[in-house]
């Protein structure tokens, strides 16, 4: 009889795709409780209820420190619910919260999780997705950082109501870290890279011009990704970097253009369902993992594909 | 701030000896542990070593009394990663080597590394890579901050240290923001590959490293018992690890003017549009 606690740093807006996937996974367990380190918005309450989850805990962020409030919320929620499964995002910030709670409360922390079974066995990617492993907690509490695009989003349909309770955090300790600057980044209209169903990624071969990639991404409703060579060159923001030191993606479709396919790039995309590679060099390693490889100039192939998609849709 | 009156810093840089990512990596089916032959210094830990050296060089150099201790936990050959860090310029090495460590998970690893840091007198700053290239969990730095009670500054894309107030300022990408964070010592700092460009060991560095001291310690020396680490001290148990089948060979076509259409045909066949 497992009880799941699903933790979100922010539920002040409508839950996004990855957050919904976590709610889906949580709703499969005997009991599920949501905890949020912000106030839970009305939209978020409706969404939580639509997964058949009836209890949520919240504590508004006093805006001090970095990560310290979120850590206090997660800890208090775990102690209060006595959950044996904690679900959180696989982003670096969420993982670190889970990691700290794991040592504080003698729990297991498992990252890159793609599923958790009824008997609390986590399935996870290992060695950049070249292995699939399963692991469990030996102490009775499992903290799982779940990869986006791993769980099929499915609200349970029972749109009851959710009871939201304030979490008592006691006296919060003086934060050790202070935020001295915040720079907002431009918000893109595109789906977020980590969650997108389709990713169009460019590398050194785009030679400074992401135009053809943007055009194809528009036609496909895709997110834009990049290799480190492209982000290092300053052609696109570092946030677009896919790979070992960027974002790991597992979309339905990854279109790689002008990217050679170095090991660090593959590490972030080789679990994609379908891979299409466009590269001038027939010997590029990316062709080894492509379902469809096109030896050609991306400046010709991508615009033609974008136009063809639009033509077929018209 | 490079006046000689700067209080000397003791920096511990954590370096991990990991299987080379350029080769195929395997998990042994009996022990469910990673095959660790062909190991090297984790590429991402070179950024940690560089960050430590940069802080020292900006603050009076080693002549000012600063120490950069390259520390690792792992079996015998792990010392090679410490040696590489010494060649880059770290001042001494520390190697935690004990048969009982085999099979430690993240929690047990962090417990051991925290004890290793405590073993260093007056450690001010622990610097790590953003992730080890084998476990790829990025959890050890946060766990060390928790266990040591140090400030946590992780995933730093840039690092500045102000010696006059002994404060670190870092930038980090967070959600849709770039945040600037500040904390005093003691701290755990993890750096990304955006933070700097690691230097290569030069001939002088390689020669100098031969004379640097590497201290080897076992669990007892740092106050831990066998059951604190290894499988017994771990909170996770790995049940199985299966290699994914290689992706089936795909179709390769040469563009003769119609490849964009072929791309869309493929999307239609796979019901992707
Ligand atoms: C510690 C570390 C971490 C790293 N992390 C990452 C990471 O997270 N992500 C990542 O991507 N890399 C990472 N790298 C870098 C990685 O090793 C490669 O250097 C990088 O991925 C190369 O990028 P690229 O494929 O765009 O460039 P290149 O390797 O230069 O390849 C460019 C390709 O474009 C092709 N091309 C050129 N013009 C055209 C054209 N007109 N049409 C079609 N094709 C064309 C060429 O044939 C070539 O194959 C990391 C490296 C290190 C050391
Ligand atoms: N066995 C180890 N020895 C030394 N440092 C380690 C070890 N394991 C992890 N680290 C450090 O912790 C960082 C993050 O590792 P991880 O949490 O495993 O991804 C690495 O980049 C290292 O700096």
Image: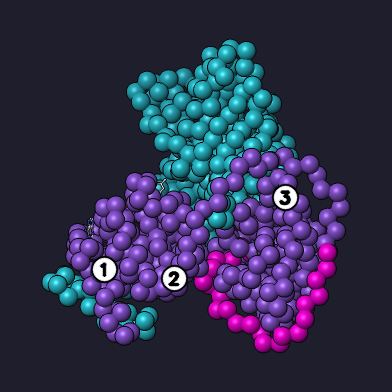
Chain colours: A purple, B cyan
User: Image point 49% across, 56% down: which residue?
Assistant: A186
For mark 2, what is the residue? A251
Query: Do discs 2 and 1 belong to a common subunit?
Result: yes
| Residue for badge 3 | A63
Badge 1 is on which residue? A302
Helix, strand or loop status at disc 1: helix
Rounded to the nearest angstrom, the CA distance separating label 3 from label 1 is 45 Å
Tell me the quarter of the picture where residue B193 sits: top left
How far from the left and from the top, in percent, is residue B149?
73, 40
Mark 3 Cβ and ligand 2 under 8 Å apart: no
Disc 2 chain ID: A
Label whose residue precedes the other's in the sequence (3 or 2): 3
Q: Which residues are magenta?
A: A139-166
- On the question of residue A33 being in view, the answer is yes
Depth-wise, is mark 2 or mark 1 nearer the camera? Answer: 1
Badge 3: chain ID: A
Which chain's residue wears label 1?
Answer: A
Residue nearer the viewer, A256 or B26:
A256
Labelled pair 2, 1 in contact (Cβ < 8 Å): no
Residue at point 68%, 41% (across, down): A178
């Amino acid at each position: 009889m497992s009880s799941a606690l699903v933790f979100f740093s922010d539920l002040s807006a409508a839950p996004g795709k990855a957050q919904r996937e976590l709610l889906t996974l949580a709703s499969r367990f005997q009991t599920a409780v949501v905890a949020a380190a912000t106030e839970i918005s009305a939209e978020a309450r409706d969404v939580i209820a639509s997964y058949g989850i009836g209890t949520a805990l919240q504590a508004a962020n006093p805006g001090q420190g970095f990560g310290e409030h979120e850590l206090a919320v997660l800890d208090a929620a775990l102690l209060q619910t006595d959950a044996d499964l904690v679900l959180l995002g696989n982003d670096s910030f969420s993982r670190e919260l889970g990691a700290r709670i794991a040592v504080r409360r003698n729990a297991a922390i498992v990252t890159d999780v793609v599923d958790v079974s009824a008997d609390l066995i986590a399935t996870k990617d290992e060695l950049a997705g070249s292995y699939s492993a399963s692991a469990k907690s030996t102490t009775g509490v499992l903290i799982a950082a779940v990869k986006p695009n791993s769980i099929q989003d499915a609200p349970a349909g029972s749109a009851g109501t959710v009871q939201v309770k304030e979490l008592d955090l006691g006296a919060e300790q003086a934060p050790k870290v202070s935020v001295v600057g915040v720079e907002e980044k431009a918000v893109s209209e595109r789906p977020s890279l980590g969650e997108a169903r389709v990713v169009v990624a460019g590398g050194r071969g785009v030679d400074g011009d992401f135009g053809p990639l943007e055009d194809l991404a528009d036609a496909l409703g895709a997110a834009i990704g990049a290799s480190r060579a492209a982000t290092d060159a300053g052609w696109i923001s570092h946030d677009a970097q896919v790979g070992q030191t960027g974002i790991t993606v597992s979309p339905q479709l990854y279109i790689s253009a002008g990217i050679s396919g170095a090991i660090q790039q593959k590490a972030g995309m080789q679990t994609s369902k379908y891979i299409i590679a466009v590269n001038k060099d027939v010997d590029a390693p990316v062709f080894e993992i492509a379902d469809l490889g096109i030896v050609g100039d991306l400046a010709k192939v991508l615009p033609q594909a974008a136009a063809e998609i639009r033509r077929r849709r018209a | 701030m490079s006046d000689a009156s700067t209080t000397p810093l003791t920096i511990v840089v954590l370096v991990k000896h990991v299987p080379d990512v350029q080769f195929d990596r395997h998990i042994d089916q009996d022990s469910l542990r990673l095959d660790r032959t062909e190991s090297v210094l984790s590429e991402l830990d070179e950024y940690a070593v560089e960050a430590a050296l940069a802080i020292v060089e900006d603050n009076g150099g080693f002549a000012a009394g600063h120490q950069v201790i390259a520390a690792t936990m792992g079996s015998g050959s792990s010392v090679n990663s410490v040696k590489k860090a010494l060649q880059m310029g770290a001042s001494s090495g520390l190697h935690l080597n004990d048969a009982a460590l085999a099979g430690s998970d993240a929690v047990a690893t962090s417990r051991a590394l925290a004890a290793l840091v405590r073993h260093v007198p007056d450690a001010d700053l622990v610097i790590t890579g953003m992730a080890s290239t084998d476990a790829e969990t990025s959890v050890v730095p946060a766990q060390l901050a928790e266990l040591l009670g140090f400030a946590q500054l992780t995933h730093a894309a840039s690092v500045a240290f102000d010696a006059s107030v002994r404060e670190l300022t870092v930038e980090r990408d967070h959600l849709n923001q770039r945040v600037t964070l500040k904390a005093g010592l003691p701290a755990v700092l993890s750096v990304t590959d955006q933070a700097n460009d690691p230097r290569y060991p030069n001939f002088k560095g390689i020669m100098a490293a031969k004379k640097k001291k590497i201290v080897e310690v076992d669990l007892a020396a740092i106050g831990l018992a066998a059951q604190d680490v290894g499988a017994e001290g771990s909170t996770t148990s790995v049940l199985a690890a299966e290699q994914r089948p290689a992706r089936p060979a795909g179709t390769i076509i040469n563009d003769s003017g119609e490849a964009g259409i072929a791309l869309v045909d493929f999307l239609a066949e796979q019901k992707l549009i």
